[in-house]
Each structure stands twice: as C-alpha cells, then as structure tokens.
Amino acid sequence: MSNVMAIARRDIARLLRVPAAWVVLFGLVFIPPLYAWFNIAGFWNPYGNTNAIEVIVVNNDRGTDSKTIGKMNMGAQIVRQLKSNTQLGWKFADQSAAMQRVESGASYASIIIPGDFSDRVAGVIEGHSTRPTLEYYVNEKANALASRITDTGASTVDSQVNETFVSTVSKVVSGVVNKTDAEINTKADSATADTLADLNKAQQSVADIRSNISDLTTTLNGVPDKTKAARGTLDKTQKAGAGTSQQLNDASSAIAKTQNTLNDFVNGAGGTLDQSSSLLSQASSQSNVAINSIAAGLTKANGDVGSALSTAQQINTDTGSLISRLEAAGVPGSSSAIADLKTQNQRLGDSINALSDLNSSKNLGSTVSSTVSAANGINTSTQSALGNAANARKTITTGALPQLNNGLNGLSSVAATSSANLASQGSLITQSTLVLNQLDQAATTAAKALAGTDKGLANLQSHLTTLTTDISALSGSSTLGSSGILAKSVGGDGKLDAAKIADFMLSPTVLDTKIVYPVSTYGSGMAPLFTNLTLWVGAFMLVVLMKLEVDDDGLENEPTPGQRYWGRWILFALIASIQAVVTVLGELIIGVQCYNVPIFIITAILASIVYVSITYALSATFLHVGKALCVALVIIQIPGSSGMYPIEMMPKFFRALYPYLPFTYSINALRETIAGFYRADWFANMGRLMIFAILFFILGLAVKPHMGNLQRLVDRQLKASDIISSEPALHKSGEYPISQALNMLADKEEYRAGIEERARKFALLYPKLMRGALAFGIAVPAAMAITFSLTTGTKLIALAAWVIWFLVTIIFLVVVESIRDSLARQVRLGNLEDDAVRTLLYERQRPRKKAKAKTAHKNTEGGDLQ
C-alpha cells in the first residue's frame, strides 16, 4: 500500500511542478464538461421554439354556396385561424412560390387547400360527396427532426379543418333542431306519457297474473288432501263391500238351508215353521243392514270423487285462462314456461276425463243404484217369505210349501246376484284410486310450472319498474330548456348553442393530466445522458493524454504490477472526480432541476470513477485496441441505454444489450436525483454500476500483468510504422517465462535445437496465415453484405455480424503475431549465456526479496523499541 500511495503522491507532485501540465489539467477538467453544458443549454426547450420552423399554406379554395349551410369559404376560415396560431412559423403564398421554397429547403413543408375544398365539405354535410383532402408536401432532406415537427403542423391544420367542419355542422343541426323544438318536445312528451301508461298497464297485468297464479297454486296445494280423503273412503267402501258380499253368500247359504229344512219338515209342526220364519227375518235384517252400509259408503265415495273432480275441473279452467293471458302478454323468454303449462294442463284434463267417466252413472253411480235395488229386493222377498210362512200354518197342506220354496229361491237368487255385484265393484274402486294418484301427480307438476312462471313474471315486473323509473327521470329532463341532459348545450333563450355543441363534439372528454415525478424542462430531462457522455469522454481523455505505464523514478522500492496499476488509477480517479464535480456544478448553475443536490454530486463522482476504471483497464491491458473498444462502447451506449428515447422504441439488438451497459444504471440513478426517488431504485442502480468497476478491476489486475510481451510486440510494430504514437511497456519482467529459462539451463543445446525447428516451421506458415486472414477479412464481410441485402429487417444483425467478424479477425492476427513473437523470444533465450539467464531469474525475484527484507527490518525495529 505504501508503494501505491508513493506512486500517487509522486505523480501529483510532477503535475504541480510543471506549469505546462496545469494547462493540460485545466483542459482535462473543464473541456469535457463543456459538452454537457452546451448540449443541455441547446436542448433546454427546443419545442418552445417551433414557431421559427417555416410552413407555407396555400389557399386555393373558391368557397361554396350551399342550400343547407349557405355561403362558406372554409379555406379563408382556416387561414384566419392559422394566423393566430404560434405553434409553427406559418407563411402564406401561392402554390408555385410555396413549392419552390419547399424544394429549395427554405421552408420545411407546405400545405395546399384545393379549390373545391368548401364544395366537398358542403357535400359531406348534405350526404352526396367524398371526404375533402388537403395536400401536404414535406422536405425530409432539409432536417430529419423538422419533418416530424411539420407533421405536427399538418395535424394542426387538419384539426383546424375538423374544428371548422364541426362548427359548421353544429350550426346547421342547431338551426334545424331549434326550428322544430316545440313540435319535438310535444311529441316527446306525448310519447313518453303513452309509454308510461302502457308500462303501468303491463305492470298491473303482470301483478294480476301473479295473483291468479298464487290463488291457483293454493288450490293445487289443497288437491292432495282431497284426493287423500277420497282414497280413504274408497278403501273403507272396498272393505265393507267385501264383508257384505261374504254376508250375502252366508245369507244365501242360510236360505238354502232353510229351504231344505222346510222340505224336510213339510209335515212337521208349526214350531218348526216359526223357527224358520225367525231365521229368515234375522237373515233379512242382516242383509238389509249390510246393503244399506255399502250403499251409504258408495254414496259418500261418489260425493268425494265428485268434489275432487269439481276442483280439478276448476284448476284446469283457471290454468287454461292463465295460459291465454300469458300468450297475450307476449313476455320475452316465457315461451318455454307456457309450453310446460300447456302440457301439464292437458295431462290434468285427461285425468279429469277419466275420473268423470268413473264417477258417471254407468260406473260408480250405477253401482250405488244396484246396491239400493238389491236391498229393496231382499226386503220385498223377505216380507213375501214371512207372509207366506204365516199363511203356511193355515195352508201348509194346501200348496203353501211350493209358494214358500218359490220365495226362498227368489231370495237366494237376489242374495247371490247382490254378492256378485258387490264383488265386481272392487276393480272400479281400484281404478278410482289410480286416477286419484294421477290427479295428485298432475297437481304437483302444475304447481312447479306455475312457480317457474311466477319467478319469470317477477323478473319482468322488476324490469318494468326500472324502465318506468328511467323513462320518468328522462321525461323530467327531456325539454331543451330544463336542467337535464342537454342543459349545458342550451343558451339563455332556451335554444341550442351551436358553439357549445361544437366544443363538445370536438372534445367530448376532458383530460385531467397529473404528472408523476415532474421534470421542469427538456434540458433537465436530457441532463443524465449528456452528463454520462461527458464523464465518459473525460475518462477517455485521461487514458489518451496521460501515460498508462508507471516508471520507478523516485520510488524507494520497485513496485509490483498491481501496485503500479493502483497507483496510476488513484491519480486518474482523483482527476475524474474533479471533472464530475465541475460538470454537475455547472449544470446546477445553468438551472438543471435537482431533487437532491448532494446525492446528485455523489452519483456523478461514482459514475466518473467507474468509467475511469473501465477505460483505464481496457487501455492499459489492450493498449490501442482497448482505446478503440472504449470508443465502440460509448457509440453503443448512446442508443442502447435509454438516454434519449425509451428503450422499448429501440431495435431488438439494443434492447438485448440494455441490461449490460453501464450507462443504463448511471442514467437511471441520475434521473432519481433529478426528479425524485422511488423506493431503493437509486441504491439498486448504483450497486449494479459498481459491478462494472469490480469486473474491470479484475481485468486490469489479473490480465494486464500477463500482457507485457504483447504490449512490447505492439510497441515495436507501431515504432516500425514511424507514424502512430505508442507508449513502451516499462515493466520488463515476464519477457522470458521461468519454465522456459529453466528448460534452457537444464539442456541448452536440446532446447535451442527444438525451438529453432519450431520457429522455422512457423516462419513458413506465417505468410499463408496472414494472406488467409486478409482474404477472409474481405470475403466474409462482402458475403455478409450480399446475404443481408437480400433480406429485410436484418440491418442490425448484419452490423453485429460485421463487428463480431472484425473482432475475430483482430484476435486472430494478434494470436498469430504473439506466437511469432514468442518463438522469436525463445530463440533469443536459447542464444543467451547461462549467466545472463540466471541474472534474468534473479531480477524476477528481486522485488519480492526487497519487500520481504523491508518487512523484516520493520519488525526488527519494532522489537528494538519494545
């Protein structure tokens, strides 16, 4: 570290002792900042001076006299408006003079209004013409950027034309509207009232339908209870009929038994006849009771089924009426629900028909009548039999027995017939139960369909309510003189204001601009780019004007390559820091916006130090090639670092390089200090910028010490040219590698013979390699030029390919020359005496021995003091 500081102090003292060096230092410090100062001042507000850019307007418009808009000359109106416009330097002339000035470059552009311009505008308004056209001539040779500015001027004229056109149309439309204002308002109010009345009527209809649906749904929900009661009655009737049928069978058997007994005891006593009469009376009584019970049950079942049938018929009728009303209402999207209701109502009608047929006099009604007739027949037969039995006592021997047998036979026949009739009614009751089940299912399905319909009607009712509210609100603002929608377009007299309507049509929206991180001037916005260019140019001037090699004069100990590098870097960094301070202070004096002055200065100093590190490492390591790379880097960074245009606007080639350029991060960091900070962006950008310094420190410290032989080769060849300036390498160590020197000392003759043979072979190959490099160096770029000229969109790819091939060719030539020089040095080494070689090895180790001795001496002195 002592050698590093000693080198830095010695170099500073040398500069201060020589007055001529002060002039150079002054130029190094103040000339580069001039680039930033003048450019920032020049770009301070370029778009504020566009009124000096001449644009000639030629008005050939003859005007028009239209029935709709009357007399009008839009060309004259446009000229009047442009004369008050200061956006550009508007001039007015005839067509020949205008074209002459544009072609000569005296004017940047010309806009010609054709003679039929007003006619075409009137034709557009009246609907029988094509769009009017302006002729725009621009001289792009005069200035690339001026043509873009004049494009803005053409847009201004186009805007003026549009404004005039809209104003004219607005006047025409306003006149027509104002003329028919009363009639329109009357018709609008009448139409609104009719519409509101229709909507209210529709709402009431929907409400009535929903009420009917609610009542019908309630009735349908009660159907299952009624059908359940009917099924219960039918079940009881079926069971009673089965019991009565059995009792009638038993009665028939008893009658037969009685008849047999009478026949057996035809000659018996009267007591037996009395017993038979008693049994017959008992059987008749039981039969009458059972038959009357069956008749009552069937009558009740018939009544319940009739009630259910009446309810179902009412539901069927109401549903049909509801379907008719829904079809008449024409509700959007209700066709599916109406179809479902029709299907379910048809099924319900089929069930009603079946139940009605079952309940008719031919089925369940006839069964009740038959049952009652059977009871009457049994009673009549029984009374007849009893009368006959009573008379039998008197006339038992005179023909009573045959009469009694006839009565008993009739009674038995009636009982058997009644039993059969009752048994046959079971199938009818079962069928009635099935029909009732179908009625339940139909009622449930109909209720679901009605629920869906009611939901749809509810949505419709909501929409109708909203529509009514909106129309009512609009009707309150529909008149032109009210405070409604058109109020802002109405004048104080209640008529449409054409000027206000034109303003609205030209700009229907208002843009409220809110600037985030505002920058006061265009110059302040360009300051980061020009500052970085200045710092890079300043760093490059340092490595061009000042020596890169460090000599040993005035140094107590011979420095190592690393100490030489750091010692000279400190001097460069100090001067670069002064350059940065002078640059940014001058910018602040000019008036560049700055959010944080101390950080602004620190950012410039750090960026300048990084650029010195890059240029010094490249120049010290690769000499003239490194200096050429410094120039190439600054050329690439101008379009590739987003300093002037957003990187998104650049070609893909530069967008790919953007993250790998130091300007990217230093420009972003300076923008933070000028316009304001966002989170930790400044630290992130400066951290990435420091990575470049570290990488080039590694290049300078690790690679440069091994480039001594190449530097000596380049220096010798540049001296041979006797026209290109060069700086000889002062660090002599490393000319002969230690391994080669040891091989030579081990067996000098074998080493010399081997190296001379290799040198001879390479000498024969060298001319071929050089001619091949020259041929390929010309042929390959030419082939690339032909290839890329036949394709589109490959300009940057071709440029990159040329640069890469150029670098490959240079590297190839350098490698060939390095091999040639290495063989020549080895041949010289083989011709040296052994003592000279040993001296060279000793010289290689002397700086290290001196450093170790000095360290040991200091340690000894420290021990003595203790």
Image (tube, grey):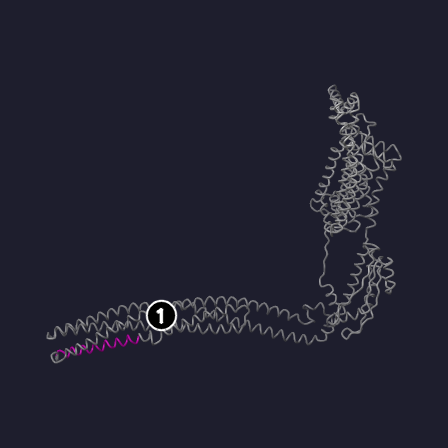
Instruction: Name the foreground residue: 21 vs 275.
Output: 21
Residue 536 appears in view: yes
State the residue lying farthest toward the top.
864
Please provide the residue range marked out in magenta.
Answer: 368-393
Residue 595 appears in view: no
The residue to which callout 1 is attached is 432
Relative vertical location of residue 391 with respect to residue 832 in this rendering, above or below: below
Q: Secondary structure at mark 1?
A: helix
Relative vertical location of residue 647 with respect to residue 112 in this rendering, above or below: above
Q: Position of residue 416 (x, y in %)?
A: 24, 73
Q: Quadrant of residue 492?
A: bottom right
In-image side of 133 versus 200 (left or right): right
Q: Residues within 10 Å of mark 1 (few under 14, many from 20)?
A: many
Relative vertical location of residue 87 with respect to residue 636 in this rendering, above or below: below
Instruction: Name the foreground residue: 72 vs 718.
Output: 718
In-image side of 609 versus 27 (left or right): left
